[in-house]
Image: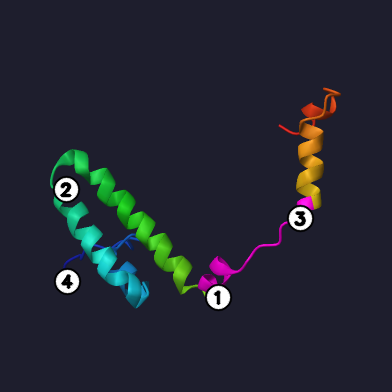
Amino acid sequence: MSAQPVQEHDPDDPVETLRVLPEQFREQFLNEYALAAEAARRPEGYRALHDLLRLWRLTAAAYSEPGFEARCYRPRYLNIQRLDYLWTIRHSSAGIAGNLIT
């Protein structure tokens, strides 16, 4: 029996990213991947491929999270009174109060 090399799990594997990525993003991923893979044939292009795969893996993970898209488009609560208070403190002529927020 000969020893077989152990296949390490690559978190940025494009096949895995494609499996998890929602359908509406797959064509864009494949186009960007093809361009980056071609550029990576030169040593200075490798980093861009690596970064692209990481970005798409994280994008796929986010979109596969239940409710992610809904949270992206939900209006956020904005406390105008709090912002007005912080602005007043920051721009106060007292000087000391202006140093409370950096």
Q: How is the image coloured?
A: rainbow
Q: Label 3 neighbourhood size at 10 Å, few (<14), some (14-19), many (20+)?
A: few
Residue at numbered disc 4:
1
Q: Residue at x 71, y 62 (%)?
A: 77
Q: Looking at the rendered structure, which numbered label has been put on residue 67?
A: 1
Front disc: 3 or 4: 3
Q: Position of residue 8 (x, y in %)?
A: 31, 61
Say which quarter of the image contains residue 16.
bottom left
**Would you call the spot at circle 2 few (<14 residues within 10 Å), some (14-19), or many (20 or more)?**
some
**Residue 28 % position (x, y):** 28, 65
Q: Are marks 2 and 3 in contact (CB under 8 Å)?
A: no
Which label was assigned to residue 39? Answer: 2
Q: Nearer the viewer, mark 2 or mark 3?
A: 3
Q: Check if residue 70 falls in the magenta segment.
A: yes
Give the CA separation, mark 1 to mark 4: 49 Å
Q: Are marks 1 and 2 in contact (CB under 8 Å)?
A: no
Q: Are marks 1 and 3 in contact (CB under 8 Å)?
A: no
* Position of residue 17 measured from the top left corner of the image (x, y, whole percent): 33, 67
Residues in magenta?
Answer: 66-80
Q: How far apart, in angstroms, are the residues tagged by discs 2 and 4?
A: 41 Å
Amino acid beneath label 3: Asn
